[in-house]
Amino acid sequence: MNKLKVMILESDISDLYRLVNLVNSISELELVFATTRAEELLKEINTNKFDIAILDLSISNTYGFEVAEFLTINYPNVKIIFISSYIEFGIRAYKYYPEDYLVKPINVFRLNQTVKRIMSHAFNFYKSKKIVIKNKGLSKFIDIEDINYIEKKKDNTKIHLVNEEIIDSKESLNDLEIKLQSYGFFRIHQSYIVPVGRRQAMLR
């Protein structure tokens, strides 16, 4: 069975042990290296091949962003998963096109879904999916891959597609977040849902 090789940067030693146990419990993953120090991870990056970097972000330690910057420039094929106790880092984290942004305590189901999505792309068995959007009593099928981002404006939800079409819906962001979370979407702001891991334009 193909496995994805993982490196972890977690500033809190207790959280690091928990995360190591969590990664080891997922059969599709192989832990290559885990540390609390960014400089040790950067050294290891140049000597070990790996597929996923799990990077911690905290108020006192934002080295995860520095490592993400290094990876984005030098190892663009490495998939980044951010973890943090703070949802506020989400907007800044989006700059690095992460596969996910997980808020502590880590939801093992969510992590599993993210891993499966990465594997589906890595080993080429991704299948196109559609969701149903309801508006004004009608149902519209939309390809997941066509969604650029989703925003809330007053009482309306606007779904922006990659072809610049905008679809209005009365569905709440909470409902859409639940529908889309297993496809790699996460909420970076109370008014925005974005697809991670894809390089799409987004209004600031």
Image (cartoon, grey):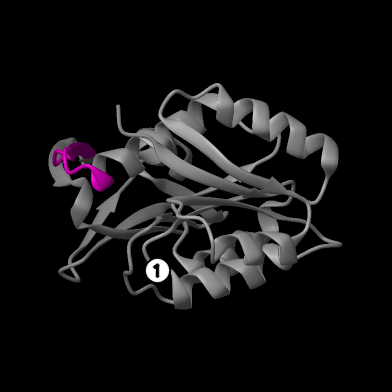
From the viewer's perspective, is residue 47 above or below residue 110?
below
First to last magenta residue range: 121-133
Identify the element where label 1 is drawn.
Answer: loop
Q: Residues within 10 Å of mark 1 (few under 14, many from 20)?
A: some
| Quarter assignment of residue 147 | bottom left
Question: 61 or 131: nearer the eye?
Answer: 61
Task: Give the side of residue 88 with respect to residue 194, left or right.
Answer: right
Spot occupied by residue 14 in the image (x, y as percentages of width and height): 83, 35
Task: Answer with left or right where residue 143 lies relative to residue 62.
Answer: left
Residue drawn where x is 65% and y is 72% of the image: 66
Total residue callouts: 1
x, y (%) of residue 202? 38, 72
Q: Amino acid at mark 1?
A: Pro
The residue at the point 13 percent across, 41 percent down is 141
Give how far across and how far down residue 169 sits, in percent.
29, 48
Rendered position, 5 above or below 113 = below
Residue at mark 1:
76
Q: Is residue 49 magenta?
A: no
* Residue 204 in view, yes or no: no
Report x, y in % for residue 116. Answer: 35, 34
Pick whichever, 137 or 181, lies toward us: 181
Of residue 182 and residue 153, the one placed in the foreground of this image is: 182
Q: Is residue 17 left or right of residue 4?
A: right
Q: Which residue is pictured at 70% across the width and 38% down the height?
A: 104
